[in-house]
């Protein structure tokens, strides 16, 4: 098997945004934010995003407060509300194995898929917050065991969605000649997954359609992409890659940098430290120490998925160039967070996406001419 390199895909890069379905926005900071976690704000945001050129929205699942996020709407029900408010947007519902089992998840999502013409997708998350598991009486498994369970969860979902008389004997889930009717509408819900440890990458290579990872530099993304593509190819599979980034797009670079400074200056140090403690604990159990947050600084953690590290902070031209650099590193999708979501998603659609498309078109012309 030859090593796969992170060749950029000729497809246009896709855009997703984080649904702010938990309170406090996407940064652990007391900076004033016009983002709201309520349903009306989010329905309007979904319509703005769809018009702006976003393909996907990603909901979050939290069962208790942590890093703030005091209020949390549930992800599947909330996803359905956003789908009902939009026409084209695909909404990715986060599912946490443990609280969800694959039987209920497969049925819920199949029904939503039928109701929405196949616009629902799922993000299987494996858990990082032991306090949350304790609070809801769920056993806290070791890092790699969490991924073993998530892999069985994904195999079960896929089996239930695609086969009649589905049978499966795992350590966590079992099925015996189970037939789900109706199955989801076509196209089948895409299966995303979050995490960046070795266990996360190996699971992506074996069973996921999409691998979501925390914000990072193009070089570090390329390393992950090459690892996953190599392993997926050995399984005869292809996995697409989504990279997190927190966008601060302003007319001048100085303005954008000043906003970043303000977010960090207003960070809630107690909450950031508590979050850092939880995630480093969770990741420390990953044997090779390469999990999400393994090398995050306190400033990185102010955006809780390392979104500043992708450096989409500057003018629309700078951001468009950097998105192309992420694409060159192998990203198929940019997953984006913003400070004031509604206004900034609109601005991103007007100012950044057309620049990205122009850069992509110029490259395609150069390739054709070569
Ligand atoms: C894009 C993305 C979205 C995530 N969403 C959630 C979520 O909604 N709820 C949750 O508990 N964990 C979420 N996670 C956490 C992951 O499932 C995983 O537990 C975490 O990244 C640690 O993974 P690692 O140590 O294997 O790298 C998300 C991770 C990523 C990268």
Image: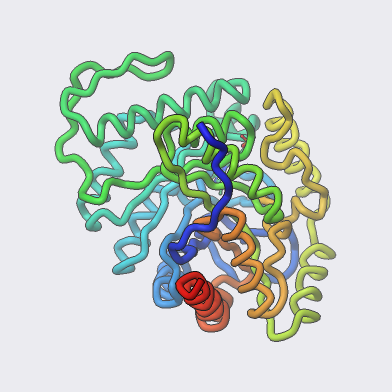
Residue 359 figure quarter: bottom right
| Left/right of residue 12 with respect to residue 135 in the rendered view | left
> Against 212, is 347 above or below?
below
Res. 194 image quadrant? top right
- Where is residue 33 shown, x and y percent of the image? 66, 70
Can you see residue 28?
Answer: no
Q: Position of residue 282 (x, y in %)?
A: 68, 31
Question: Residue at left 45%, top 76%?
Answer: 52
Vertically, is 350 above or below 328? below
Q: Quadrant of ligand 1?
A: top right
Furthest residue in direction bottom, as rendered: 251
**Residue 77 position (above or below residue 234):** below
Depth check: give the residue in front, 224 or 40.
Answer: 224
Q: Can residue 266 be seen in this snapshot?
A: yes
Residue in view at x 62 percent, y 21 percent:
142
User: Which color scheme is applied?
Assistant: rainbow
Q: Is residue 80 left or right of residue 182?
A: right
Report x, y in % for residue 73.
47, 51
Where residue 89 appears, x then y in whole percent? 36, 64
Residue positioned 46% across, 43% down in the render: 239
């Amino acid at each position: 098997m030859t090593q796969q390199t992170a060749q950029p895909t000729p497809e246009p890069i896709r855009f997703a945004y984080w649904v702010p379905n938990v309170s406090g926005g996407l940064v652990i900071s007391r900076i004033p934010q016009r983002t709201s976690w309520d349903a009306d704000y989010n329905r309007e945001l979904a319509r703005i995003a769809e018009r702006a050129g976003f393909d996907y929205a990603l909901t979050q699942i939290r069962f208790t407060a942590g890093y703030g996020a005091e209020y949390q709407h549930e992800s599947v029900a909330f996803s359905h509300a956003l789908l009902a408010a939009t026409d084209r947007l695909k909404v990715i519902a986060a599912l946490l194995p443990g609280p969800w089992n694959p039987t209920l998840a497969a049925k819920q999502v199949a029904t939503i898929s039928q109701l929405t013409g196949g616009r629902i997708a799922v993000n299987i998350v494996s858990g990082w917050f032991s306090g949350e598991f304790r609070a809801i009486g769920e056993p806290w498994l070791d890092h790699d065991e969490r991924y073993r369970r998530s892999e069985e969860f994904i195999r079960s979902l896929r089996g239930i969605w695609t086969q009649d008389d589905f049978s499966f004997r795992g350590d966590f889930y079992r099925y015996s000649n189970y037939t789900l009717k109706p199955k989801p509408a076509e196209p089948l819900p895409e299966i995303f997954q979050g995490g960046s440890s070795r266990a996360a990458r190996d699971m992506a290579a074996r069973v996921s359609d999409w691998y979501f990872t925390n914000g990072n530099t193009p070089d570090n993304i390329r390393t992950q992409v090459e690892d996953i593509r190599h392993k997926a190819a050995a399984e005869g599979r292809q996995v697409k890659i989504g990279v997190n980034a927190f966008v601060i797009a302003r007319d001048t670079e100085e303005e954008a940098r000043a906003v970043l400074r303000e977010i960090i200056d207003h960070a809630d140090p107690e909450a950031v430290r508590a979050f850092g403690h939880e995630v480093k604990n969770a990741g420390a159990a990953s044997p090779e120490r390469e999990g999400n947050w393994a090398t995050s600084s306190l400033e990185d953690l102010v955006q809780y998925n390392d979104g500043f590290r992708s450096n989409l902070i500057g003018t629309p031209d700078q951001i468009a160039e950097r998105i192309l650099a992420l694409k060159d590193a192998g990203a198929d999708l940019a997953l984006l967070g913003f400070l004031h979501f509604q206004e900034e998603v609109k601005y991103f659609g007007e100012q950044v996406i057309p620049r990205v498309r122009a850069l992509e078109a110029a490259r395609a012309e150069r390739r054709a001419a070569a």
